[in-house]
Image: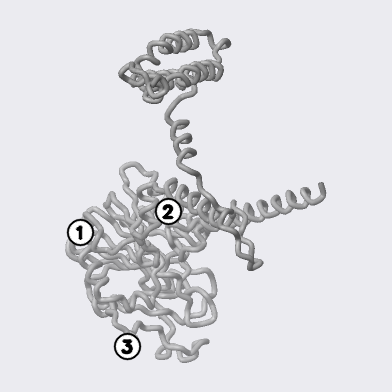
Amino acid sequence: MPRHFSAILLVLLLAALAAGVFHILTLCFESGESHPPCSSLRADPLGAKAFHDSLARLPGILVERNYRSYAKIANPEQAAIFFFGETAEGLRNIPSGIVHELESLAASGGRLVITLLPSQPCSKDTSCQQPDAGKKSEKKAATPENNPSSPSGCPPCKSRKKKGTRGLNLDERWGFRMENTCEAPEKKSTAIWTVRNSSHHVPWHSGAWFEPVKPVWKVIARCGGHPVVIERRLGGGGIVLSADSFFISNEALLLERQPQLLAWLPGAKSRIIFDEFHLGVSESPGLAFLIRKYRLQGFIFGLIILAGLFIWRTACRFVPPPDDSGEIQPLATAQGQDAAAGLINLLRRNILPAQILQVCHREWRRALGHHPPLAENILLQLDQVVEKETHAPPPAKHPVAAYNAIREQIHAHSSRAPLWNRNNTPHTSHRRRKR
């Protein structure tokens, strides 16, 4: 009993361990912590799942996620494509093929919305300074040229293409410069948005800002006098750049919700695509993808069971292993069956027990047909025995007794059969005795 109790306790502990590991993995999968920040698959404060689900509940709005190349997006002229959580370094060096695909989406009528991860200022502080309304014209961004006594003493972080990279510099291609303020903040920063002829104060958590080089850009929001959100037309669509992504995060929608700004992002598009491809979340059409697509989980589970049974069959020997003592076993230890045993097994497989007597009767009549004198004497008796046994009720049926009775009658008559040949003439040996 103690041994069985220990085994049961071990099984319960292993089951509890497996359940705990499964629960932890489920929590990690549901929260989306394995995905990058600003991903629409992430449900923690750093993700954008709340924004995605909110738009999906609006009537007349179609919300999708993109996991493939941008060239495979169908009907981009009706879509607003969100690229949330891009890094400043990634925006500076985008592969030329992706740049052409993005420009093709915008030129065909799509609206590209690109937001950057919050960038910290060059100083040790974490946000840009927001000057008072009456002092906006007096203060400028602190640089080594106009503020030599800057706490950090570092120049603005202008975007420059690194040597050896194969990407295109969007700063030069699209006509803007990306910089980073070096001012030390004195209070929480705020960006002023101008949307539909109305201004909104939005908390800002990034020290980066844009400087339009070409007049095609329109400033939408400023933080500390610097443009932080800009927009331009490109072909039949447009491009929106934002230096911060905090306002679309789950935390912002809970604590600092900005519905006017969020409603402005898609523009007039009724189809919204949250791009996950630029975050490294791609769709790989491998074996697991095909199994989920065609619902082959049951088939795979059956194959695993068959494989387990095959391994168990080959691992467990039902026949004792050969003796390794080195003695030669006699050949008689493995003998097969003779022809009679094989015939008996064949008859048992093809003739039912209730039909044995009728089959034997049919064979007897065919065999006795070669002995007319003998047949005339015993065929009538055989028919009577078989008829009686066939019509007898089940409790009174005794096929073995009937078979033995018929066999005795045939044996009794066959002992006298050699005295006559088939032509009803005396046997040769009998004629010799008379002579």
Residue 384 at x, y = what percent?
A: 45, 8
Nearer to us: label 3 or label 1: 3
- Using a 10 Å C-alpha cutoff, classify the residue at mark 3 as few (fewer than 14 neighbours), some (14 to 19) or many (20 or more): few
Residue depicted at 38% across the width and 79% down the height: 179
Q: Name the residue that disc number 3 marks.
A: 164
Residue depicted at 48% across the width and 21% down the height: 415
Q: Name the residue that disc number 2 marks.
A: 51
Residue 51 at x, y = what percent?
A: 42, 53
- Using a 10 Å C-alpha cutoff, classify the residue at mark 2 as few (fewer than 14 neighbours), some (14 to 19) or many (20 or more): some
Q: Name the residue that disc number 1 marks.
A: 109
Front residue of 153/271: it is 271
- Using a 10 Å C-alpha cutoff, classify the residue at mark 1 as few (fewer than 14 neighbours), some (14 to 19) or many (20 or more): many
In this view, the residue farthest toward the front is 435
Q: Are marks 3 and 1 in contact (CB under 8 Å)?
A: no
Q: Secondary structure at mark 3?
A: loop
Q: Secondary structure at mark 2?
A: helix
Q: First in sequence, mark 3 or 1: give its number.
A: 1
Front residue of 117/301: it is 301
Left or right of 231 in this view: 411: right
Q: What whole-number distance in Å separates the C-alpha atoms at marks 2 and 1?
A: 23 Å
Q: Are marks 3 and 2 in contact (CB under 8 Å)?
A: no
In this rendering, the answer to whether 211 lies above or below 311 is: below
